[in-house]
Amino acid sequence: TPAGLYETLHARYGDLEWWPAEGPFQVMVGAVLTQRTSWTNVERALGNLADAGVVDMATLLALPIERLEALIRPSGTYRQKALRLLALFAMVDERGNGSLAAFLDRPMADLRHDLLAVKGVGPETADSIILYAAGKPVFVVDAYTRRVLGRLGVTTGGSYDQVARWFQEGLPEDVAVYNNYHAMLVELAKDQCRTRPICEGCPIRSGCPVGRGEESP
């Protein structure tokens, strides 16, 4: 069950302070930049933006696109991501009447609808923004989550929303729980449940067909 898996992971990892970004603006930028790259590369790009004084929506929207591309280059596919950032914050600027806080302080369904309408913003990016920037309870599903559930033999139907629903229906509607759960799944996938899993010492091994050697990874 989602609650049982949470308790097992919590016994190993405890409460993790995550998302690794400062404030809603940086969370939103990071959610776009982390697409198809590591957080290490994202941190370099975020550092470049901060050093250049790009610390809010208005400053980013005023940047020439070539300058934005240069600053976020460490995150990869920087031309595509620059366009996505500009489209995202142009929409936020319009919907929030120039205020990021006003945009985020709206019903979750409205937020998700508007975010998903931006080219290049899929469910994972949108939900990361909703959970970590807006502080609203939605479960973020990423490749790590899918890998862990797949090896555990949990069948959710496979779509993003079906996986998220599996977690949300079995947990309290709590931002802190969703936040920590996502962080613990990421840590598990990095530590043990890698592409080639290290099952020795894994906290969920006893409940995992792959960990017990009954199925191949």
Image (tube, rainbow, N blue to C red):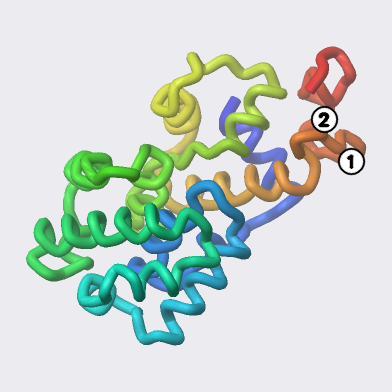
Q: CA distance from mark 2 to mark 1?
A: 8 Å
Instruction: Report the amino acid beneath label 1.
Output: Gly
Residue at 71% x, 53% y: name it.
Answer: 13
Q: Is residue 141 left or right of residue 52?
A: right
Determine whether the residue tagged by mark 2 lies in a helix, strand or loop: helix
Residue 16, position in %: x, y? 62, 59
Q: Nearer the viewer, residue 208 or 129?
A: 129
In percent of the image, x 36 and y 53: which residue is there? 129
Residue under the image location 17 percent in, 55 percent down: 91
- The reply to whether discs 2 and 1 touch (Cβ–Cβ < 8 Å) is yes
Q: Dot 1 corresponds to which residue? A: 201
Up-down relation of residue 110 to residue 66 (above or below): above
Q: Residue 38, located in which quarter of the rendered image?
A: bottom right
Numbered circle sitting on residue 180: none
Foreground residue, 31 or 127?
31
Q: Position of residue 115 (x, y in %)?
A: 25, 46
| Residue farthest toward the front in the current orientation of the protein | 66
Check residue 205 in the rendering and tell me which mark sits there, or answer none.
2
Q: Amino acid at mark 2?
A: Arg
The picture places residue 61, in percent across and down from the top left corner, at 22, 71
Q: Specify the quadrant of the image occupied by residue 90.
A: bottom left
* Rendered location of residue 85, percent (x, y): 31, 59
Q: Count of labels shown?
A: 2
Decide: few, some or many residues near mark 2? Use Cα within 10 Å; few <14, some 14-19, many ≥20.
Answer: some
Indicate the secondary structure of the residue bearing disc 1: loop
**Left or right of 126, for residue 13:** right
Q: Quick one: which residue is furthest to the right in this view?
A: 200
Q: Would you call the spot at circle 1 few (<14 residues within 10 Å), some (14-19), or many (20 or more)? A: few
